[in-house]
Amino acid sequence: MSNADTVRAIYAAFGRGDIPAILEVLAEDIDWEFAHSPDLGVPYLIPRRGRNAVLGFFQAVADNLELRRFEVTDVVGDGPVVVALTRVEWKVKSTGAIIREEDEAHVWRFDARGKVARFRHGVDTHAHVRAFQGGGAATAR
């Protein structure tokens, strides 16, 4: 399976709610959300290290967000870096704010064994912070 196929399989597993299938393709010491600061107040946009810590990401998403739309529009690359572009819409449970992202980038970096070694969401961080602070609808284009 190519790295791009692995990324597509990850999204298919996400759509089924099959988190174990996602964890299976991650390196044991994966660097998750490697470029985000831990103090933004957005519980799913914090750095995590290790496959088990990634479970915390999925739990934070489930605890804090209601998924309204998730569509992968493009998967680009097939080497050690694969980028997926998505359209997403979430409702923040605590504030009722809606987060919409058009072309939200997900960066997947693979190791030599074909495991995901690094991952990050390229999001409009300001929009996510505002939504968690009760700042109303946030749209990134």
Image (cartoon, rainbow, N blue to C red):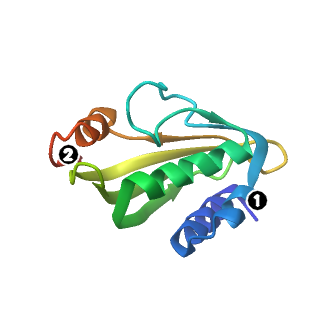
Is the residue marked by circle 2 packed among few (<14), some (14-19), or many (20+) residues within 10 Å? some
Circle number at residue 138: 2
Side of 104 where 58 appears, left or right: right
User: How far is the residue under mark 2 from the one under mark 1?
Assistant: 33 Å
Q: Would residue 72 be visible to someone looking at this image?
A: yes
Residue to which mark 1 is pinned: 24
Say which quarter of the image contains residue 7.
Answer: bottom right
Q: Which of marks 2 and 1 is nearer the N terminus?
A: 1
Query: In the depicted view, which residue is nearer to us: 43 or 127?
Result: 43
Q: Where is residue 30 in the image (x, y as percent from the top left)?
A: 71, 40
Q: Which residue lies at the image location 15% right of the left edge and 46% below the top edge? A: 136
The answer to whether the residue labelled 2 contacts the one labelled 1, judged by CB atoms less than 8 Å apart, is no
Say which quarter of the image contains residue 122.
Answer: top left
Query: In the depicted view, which residue is nearer to us: 102 or 89?
Result: 89
Q: Where is residue 101 in the image (x, y as percent from the top left)?
A: 30, 51
Residue type at numbered disc 2: Ala
Q: Which residue lies at the image location 55% right of the left edge and 36% below the top edge? A: 33
Q: Up-down: is 111 above or below 90?
A: above
Q: Up-down: is 11 above or below 40?
A: below
Is the residue marked by circle 1 packed among few (<14), some (14-19), or many (20+) residues within 10 Å? few
Q: Would residue 83 be visible to someone looking at this image?
A: no
Residue sitting at the far left: 136
Query: In the depicted view, which residue is nearer to us: 105 or 91?
Result: 91
Q: Describe the element under mark 2 as helix, strand or loop.
A: strand
Q: Which residue lies at the image location 48% right of the left edge and 29% below the top edge? A: 36
Query: In the depicted view, which residue is nearer to us: 127 or 101?
Result: 127
Q: Position of residue 28 (x, y in %)?
A: 80, 44
Q: Position of residue 40 (x, y in %)?
A: 39, 28
Tell me the quadrant of the picture where the N terminus can be found.
Answer: bottom right
Side of 104 where 51 appears, left or right: right
Q: Describe the element under mark 1 as helix, strand or loop.
A: helix
